[in-house]
Amino acid sequence: MPSSYSFDVVSEFDQQELVNAIDQLRREVDQRYDLKDSKTKIDIKEDELSIVSLSDMTIESVKDILLQKATKRNLSLKIFDFQKIETIGGNMVMQIVKLKKGLSQEISKKLSKLVRDNMKKVTASIQGDSLRITGKNKDDLQAAINLIKKQEEELDIALQFQNYR
């Protein structure tokens, strides 16, 4: 039996599920009557999406479909950071959607302080873009998970708990 247990708090998403959601989005945009001739293009990069279309109303429709497809694929909606819609040449508009991945130092410090202040039997250490919680008792770690889950709504970031051992 190990002398201590730990888990990691991370903010990640499944890249393949995102690609699948974008593929479904493209198919639906091509098939829907109201979006068929809108010249809408959705490009995916490592850490952002770009949506280009004829009008901002079309972009809002595409955004709604994107959120639906992401929800069906079990992706948290908190990973999307929608930037403002910009006008580009040729009567086209574009919206950049940043993808949130990894815990920032500020959020890691906030979670670490929360755990240290409320739970004396566990320790929190920041490790790059994740936070490791360590304790001698699995029940204490479960309590730490519940404490962090309660705080998750205020943080506006999707949290996952990995490497529970």
Image (cartoon, grey):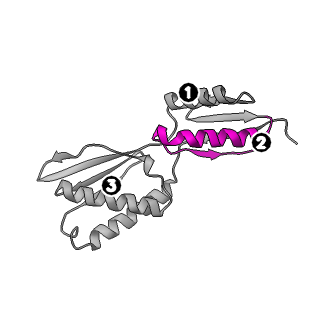
Q: Residue at x 61, y 34 (%)?
A: 131
Q: What residue would you read off at disc 3? A: 43
Given the image, on which type of amino acid does mark 1 rest?
A: Lys
Was residue 108 drawn as part of the magenta stretch in this picture? no
Quadrant hosting residue 137: top right
Look at the numbered discs 3 and 2 and tell me whether their residues touch, using CB distance below 8 Å: no
Q: Main secondary structure of the magenta part?
A: helix
Residue at 22 percent of width and 70 percent of height: 36
Residue 55 appears in which quarter of the rendering? bottom left
Q: Would you name the residue on which mark 1 appears?
A: 109
Residue 141, horizontal then vertical, whole percent? 72, 40
The amino acid on which the numbered mark 3 sits, given as a three-letter code, is Asp
Q: CA distance from mark 1 to mark 3?
A: 34 Å
Which sits earlier in the primary sequence, circle 2 or circle 1? 1
Q: Position of residue 149 (x, y in %)?
A: 58, 43
Magenta-colored span: 136-165
**Which x, y percent locates residue 129?**
55, 35
Q: Secondary structure at mark 1?
A: helix
Judging by the rendered image, the residue that carries numbered circle 2 is 138
Mark 1 or 3: in front is 1
Q: Tag 2: residue type?
A: Lys
Question: Counting residues from the N terminus, which is met first, the one under dot 3 or under dot 2?
Answer: 3
Residue count near mark 2 (Cα–Cα under 10 Å), binned few <14, some 14–19, many ≥20 = some
